[in-house]
Amino acid sequence: MARPYEVVFIFDPALDDETINTKLSTFHALVQTPGVEAPRFNHWGRRTLAYSIKKRDTGYYVVANFETEMKLLPEFERAIKLDEGVLRHLVVLNDEPPTPPNYAAVKPPEAEEEDDE
């Protein structure tokens, strides 16, 4: 049974967009399940990191939402860990709506109520 997952990648900022897209396609080919829609990618772009990772102060963020079977995840994570272009990643089970494209641009619920008045 396919379940929804969300993964956040932080790539080396020196990589170009074409290389990042190639890596994403390679990773998600490992978890592709027949009959399930293709993963959705949300490129957040280059952002300053809260702390240095592998001597880098910035990283290229990508959020991906996909559905797959749990038994395919170990090989997926293994491939990500072996790739030197990925600084960090986090895979979570996602029963919630997908993460918005830019979390800084999303208004809190209280601000939306004030705008209506």
Image: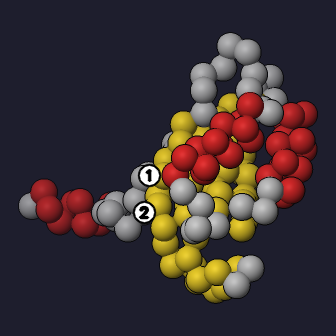
Residue behind mark 2: 103
For image coordinates 73% across by 15% down, the residue present is 34
Q: Residue furthest left?
A: 117
The picture places residue 81, in percent across and down from the top left corner, at 84, 58
Above or below for 103 versus 36: below
Q: Secondary structure at mark 2?
A: loop
Residue 4 visible in rendering: no
Count neighbours of disc 2 (C-alpha within 10 A) and say few if under 14, some if 14 to 19, many if 20 or more. Answer: few
Given the image, on which type of amino acid does mark 1 rest? Pro
Task: Choose top left, top right, bottom left or bottom right for residue 22.
Answer: top right
The picture places residue 72, in percent across and down from the top left corner, at 86, 34
The picture places residue 44, in percent across and down from the top left corner, at 47, 58
Q: Judge by depth and name the residue closer to the eye, 108 or 99.
A: 99
Q: Secondary structure at mark 1?
A: loop
In the image, is 12 to the left or to the right of 54? left
In the image, is 49 to the left or to the right of 69? left
For image coordinates 44% across by 52% down, the residue present is 100
- Do the numbered discs 2 and 1 sit on residues whose CB atoms are within 8 Å? yes
Residue 9 visible in rendering: yes
The picture places residue 17, in percent across and down from the top left corner, at 52, 52
Q: CA distance from mark 2 to mark 1?
A: 6 Å
In the image, is 92 to the left or to the right of 22? right
Location of the C terminus by quadrant is bottom left
For image coordinates 72% across by 61% down, the residue present is 85
Q: Residue furthest top?
A: 35
Given the image, on which type of amino acid does mark 2 rest? Tyr
Q: Judge by depth and name the residue closer to the eye, 95 or 26.
A: 26
For image coordinates 14% across by 62% down, the residue present is 115
Count neighbours of disc 1 (C-alpha within 10 A) and say few if under 14, some if 14 to 19, many if 20 or more. Answer: few
Residue behind mark 1: 100
